[in-house]
Image (cartoon, grey):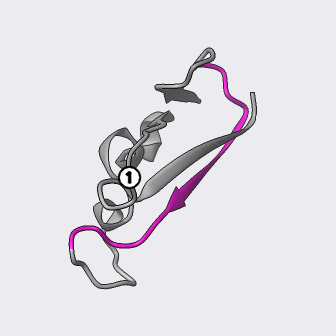
Amino acid sequence: MKVNNLPSPTNNKRAILVFAGRALNGSTRPSGTLGDYLEGQNSTPADFIYEHRKGVPTTINDRVVVVSP
């Protein structure tokens, strides 16, 4: 797996957690649409490329945490 926008090397991650936060687009939950929970690169998990994004809680809602480099 790869996690972009990290201060350390981004590739070869063994374990990560992806946390979805509250709805930003006004959608109700539960929802069957992945885009209601994750944005950007994180919304396409099949490619095993994710992104760490900094921001305020009103602009992003998903977080990626590297558990095992």
- Height in image: 16 above or below 10? below
- Height in image: 68 above or below 57? above
Identify the residue at horizontal 36%, vertical 49% (top origin). 43
Is residue 15 within the magenta segment? Answer: yes
Where residue 14 appears, as percent x and y from the top left, is 73, 32
Where residue 65 appears, as percent x and y from the top left, is 63, 44
Identify the residue at horizontal 28%, vertical 68% (top origin). 24
Identify the residue at horizontal 62%, vertical 14% (top origin). 9
Q: Is residue 5 left or right of residue 18?
A: left
Viewer-closest of 26 and 68 = 26
Viewer-closest of 32 and 57 = 57
Residue under label 1, please give it: 56
Viewer-closest of 61 and 47 = 61
Task: Look at the magenta stretch and give its main secondary structure.
Answer: loop
Is residue 13 within the magenta segment? Answer: yes
Viewer-closest of 8 and 45 = 8
Where residue 28 appears, as percent x and y from the top left, is 29, 85
Magenta residues (range): 10-25
Residue type, label 1: Val
Q: Quadrant of residue 1?
A: top right
Q: Is residue 39 left or right of residue 67?
A: left
Which SS class for mark 1?
loop
